[in-house]
Image (cartoon, rainbow, N blue to C red):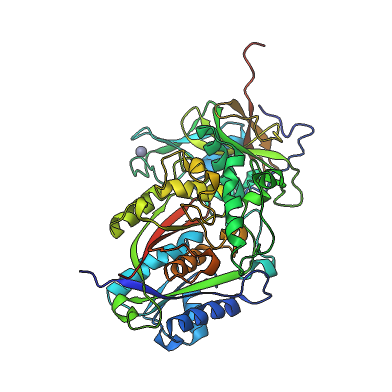
C-alpha cells in the first residue's frame, strides 16, 4: 500500500492545501503511509477530519491522531463523467467510505467504475496512498483483496 | 393574538439570458415587487439579500439610497430566502422595521460564472479532505444521495425522473419559463441525457440561468390597506446540517423533516392542509427528498407519490407550478422564486397554471449540498 498512482489511472490529484496546526499530525502520518483518525482519550470518541475540539465531550485537551486499520466499507459511491478542471481524466469514482473505526471519509476509489454500480454499499475496501510532491500522501481506497486467493 | 405579517408584493426580474448586471437585475426585482405592493423605495426600512457583494444588504441599501433599520444576509444558499422570511417576520413583529424587501438576482449564465468544482476556500477542512478528490460540488453529493435513496428503497432512476418530467409540464404553462414552448419530456429523455455524476444526468440537474426575484413583507395590519390581497406568513422552520460530504450519517433521511415540522407546528397545520408545494429542485433528488421532509408521504414513498402524473398540472399534488429550477429558472439561489410563485398561487394570478382554490402553500428551500433547509408556510388572509 505504498505505490503512487497505478499505470493507466491517470490520476493527478487536485492541489492539497498545506496542513494547519490542527491537521498537521494527520498529514505527517500520511508521509509514512499511515492513515490516522483523531481519538479523544477523555470520552473515546473518534472523529475525522481532525478538529480543534472533540464533538463528543467538548474537550480540546485530549485529542490525538491514532493509527487506523485502513479497512473500510463503501457507504455510497458516484462516478464523475464531467471534469471539474482541465487536467483531470474522467470517468473517476468518488465515495463516502466508513472506516472500521467508525468515521465516514470522502475518498477516491480505484479502479474507476464507469457505470457507477460496481461499488455497492458494503463493498470492502482498503487504503492506499498517492504520493504528493511535498512528501505527504493522499489516501484513497481500492477493493480489499478477496480471501479465497 | 399575534398581529401577524404578510407578503404584500412579489415579482421576478428578467430571467434567462439577460446580459444585465447583478444590481440591474436586483433593481428590476425590487422595484417591480414594490410596485406590485403599491410601495416605493422610500417605504423600505428592511433589506434581506445575498449574492451582491461581501456587504450584500448594505450594498443594496447604498445603491437604493436608503438607510435601513434592519438588514439580514445569512448565507445559506438556496434556503436563505425562506430563512429571511422568518427573520423578517420576527423583526416586523418586534417593531424593529416595518417594510422588508427580500431579494436576490444573479447573471450567472450571461457572466459564465458558475464552476463545476464550487468555490475554493483553502482554510476549511473540506479543502484538505474533500476537494483533492475532485468531487463535483454540489452535483456529486446529490448524486450520492440519489444512489443511496434508490438503493435503500429499491426504486429506479426512471421513477425519480418524473420530478423533471412533471416540472417540464408545468413550465409549458408558464411563458416566463426558460423551457416554455420546448415540449414535453419523458423519463427516458432524462435517463439518456449525458451523465454528470452517476446516476444523475444533465436532465436531473437544474438550469443555469440569469434571474432574480423579490418579495415585500409588512405587518398584516398595514397589508390590509395595500392594493394586493395579503398573503400571510403562517409558519417557518429551518435546519442546518453539514458543509462536508461526510457529516450526515444517512443521506436518505431528509433534514427537511425538522424544518417542516417546526413550520407546520407554528402554522398549526399538517401536511394534509397544503394545497400547493414549491420545493427547491436543484436536482431531481432534492425535490424527492423534500417531499418526504414535508411529510407529504412516508419515508421511501416519494417516488410512489409522484407517480401517475400526480404532481403534474391537474394532479392532486401540484408541485413546482412555475416549472421549477429544472425547467423555469435557476439563477444559483432559487429560493426567492419559490416564494414568488407561492404568493402568486395564493393570490390566484397564475392563469393556465393556477391551482384552483389554493389557500395554503409551502415554499421549501435547500442550500449547498443538502446543507441548509428552510420551510415557509404561506396562506390566504381569511
Ligand atoms: Zn471527547
Residue lying at the far right of the rendered structure: A8
- Camera-side residue: B199 or B323? B323
Place residue B174 in its image quadrant: bottom right
Res B77 visible = no
- Rendering coords of residue B110 (x, y %): 69, 70
- Rendering coords of residue B138 (x, y %): 59, 51
Q: How many marks?
A: 0
- Camera-side residue: A126 or B380? B380
- Rendering coords of residue A30 (x, y %): 60, 36
Residue lying at the far top of the rendered structure: A148
- Camera-side residue: B110 or A36? B110
Q: Taking B60 as reference, is B371 above or below it?
A: above
Where does ligand 1 appear, by image quarter? top left
Q: In this view, does B70 lie to the left or right of B328?
A: left
* Residue at (47, 78) in percent of width and height: B58
Res B281 visible = yes
Q: In this view, does A147 lie to the left or right of B49?
A: right
- Camera-side residue: B272 or A19? B272
* Residue at (42, 44) in percent of width and height: B297
Q: Is residue B344 left or right of residue A54?
A: right
Report the quarter where the C terminus of chain B lies.
bottom left
Place residue A121 in its image quadrant: top right
Amino acid at each position: 500500500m505504498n505505490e503512487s498512482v497505478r499505470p493507466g489511472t491517470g490520476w493527478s490529484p487536485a492541489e492539497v492545501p498545506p496542513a494547519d496546526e490542527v491537521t498537521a499530525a494527520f498529514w505527517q502520518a500520511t508521509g509514512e503511509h499511515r492513515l490516522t483518525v483523531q481519538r479523544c482519550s477523555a470520552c473515546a470518541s473518534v472523529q475525522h477530519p481532525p478538529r480543534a475540539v472533540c464533538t463528543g465531550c467538548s474537550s480540546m485537551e485530549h485529542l490525538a491522531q491514532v493509527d487506523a486499520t485502513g479497512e473500510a466499507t463503501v457507504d455510497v459511491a458516484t462516478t464523475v463523467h464531467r471534469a471539474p478542471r482541465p487536467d483531470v481524466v474522467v470517468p473517476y469514482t468518488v465515495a463516502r467510505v466508513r472506516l472500521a473505526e467508525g468515521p465516514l471519509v470522502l475518498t477516491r476509489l480505484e479502479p474507476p467504475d464507469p457505470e457507477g454500480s460496481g461499488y455497492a454499499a458494503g463493498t470492502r475496501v482498503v487504503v492506499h496512498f498517492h504520493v504528493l510532491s511535498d512528501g505527504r500522501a493522499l489516501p484513497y481506497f481500492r477493493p480489499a483483496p478477496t480471501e479465497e486467493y | 393574538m399575534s398581529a401577524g405579517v404578510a407578503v404584500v408584493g412579489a415579482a421576478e426580474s428578467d430571467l434567462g439570458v439577460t446580459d444585465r448586471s447583478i444590481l440591474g437585475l436586483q433593481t428590476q426585482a425590487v422595484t417591480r415587487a414594490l410596485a406590485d405592493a403599491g410601495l416605493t423605495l422610500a417605504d423600505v426600512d428592511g433589506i434581506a439579500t445575498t449574492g451582491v457583494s461581501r456587504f450584500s444588504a448594505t450594498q443594496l441599501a447604498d445603491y437604493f439610497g436608503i438607510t435601513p433599520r434592519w438588514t439580514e444576509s445569512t448565507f445559506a444558499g438556496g434556503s436563505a430566502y425562506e430563512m429571511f422570511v422568518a427573520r423578517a417576520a420576527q423583526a416586523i413583529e418586534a417593531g424593529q422595521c416595518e417594510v422588508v424587501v427580500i431579494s436576490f438576482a444573479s447573471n450567472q449564465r450571461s457572466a459564465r460564472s458558475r464552476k463545476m468544482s464550487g468555490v475554493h476556500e483553502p482554510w476549511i477542512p473540506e479543502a484538505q479532505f474533500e476537494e483533492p478528490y475532485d468531487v463535483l460540488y454540489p452535483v456529486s453529493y446529490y448524486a450520492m444521495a440519489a444512489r443511496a435513496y434508490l438503493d435503500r428503497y429499491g426504486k429506479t432512476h426512471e421513477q425519480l425522473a418524473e420530478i423533471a418530467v412533471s416540472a417540464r409540464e408545468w413550465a409549458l404553462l408558464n411563458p416566463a419559463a426558460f423551457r416554455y414552448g420546448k415540449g414535453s419530456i419523458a423519463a427516458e429523455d432524462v435517463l439518456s441525457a449525458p451523465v454528470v455524476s452517476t446516476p444523475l444526468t444533465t436532465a436531473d440537474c437544474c438550469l443555469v440561468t440569469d434571474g432574480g426575484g423579490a418579495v415585500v413583507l409588512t405587518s398584516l395590519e398595514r397589508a390590509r390597506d395595500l392594493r394586493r390581497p395579503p398573503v400571510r406568513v403562517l409558519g417557518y422552520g429551518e435546519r442546518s446540517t453539514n458543509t462536508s460530504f461526510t457529516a450526515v450519517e444517512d443521506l436518505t433521511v431528509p433534514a427537511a423533516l425538522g424544518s417542516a415540522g417546526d413550520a407546520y407546528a407554528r402554522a398549526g397545520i399538517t401536511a394534509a392542509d397544503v394545497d400547493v408545494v414549491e420545493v427547491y429542485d436543484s436536482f431531481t433528488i432534492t425535490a424527492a427528498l423534500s417531499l418526504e421532509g414535508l411529510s407529504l408521504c412516508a419515508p421511501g414513498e416519494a417516488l410512489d407519490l409522484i407517480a401517475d402524473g400526480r404532481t403534474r398540472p391537474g394532479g392532486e399534488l401540484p408541485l413546482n407550478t412555475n416549472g421549477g429550477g429544472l425547467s423555469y429558472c435557476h439563477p444559483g439561489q432559487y429560493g426567492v422564486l419559490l416564494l414568488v410563485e407561492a404568493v402568486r398561487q395564493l393570490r390566484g394570478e397564475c392563469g393556465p397554471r393556477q391551482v384552483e382554490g389554493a389557500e395554503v402553500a409551502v415554499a421549501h428551500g435547500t442550500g449547498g449540498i443538502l446543507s441548509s433547509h428552510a420551510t415557509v408556510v404561506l396562506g390566504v388572509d381569511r
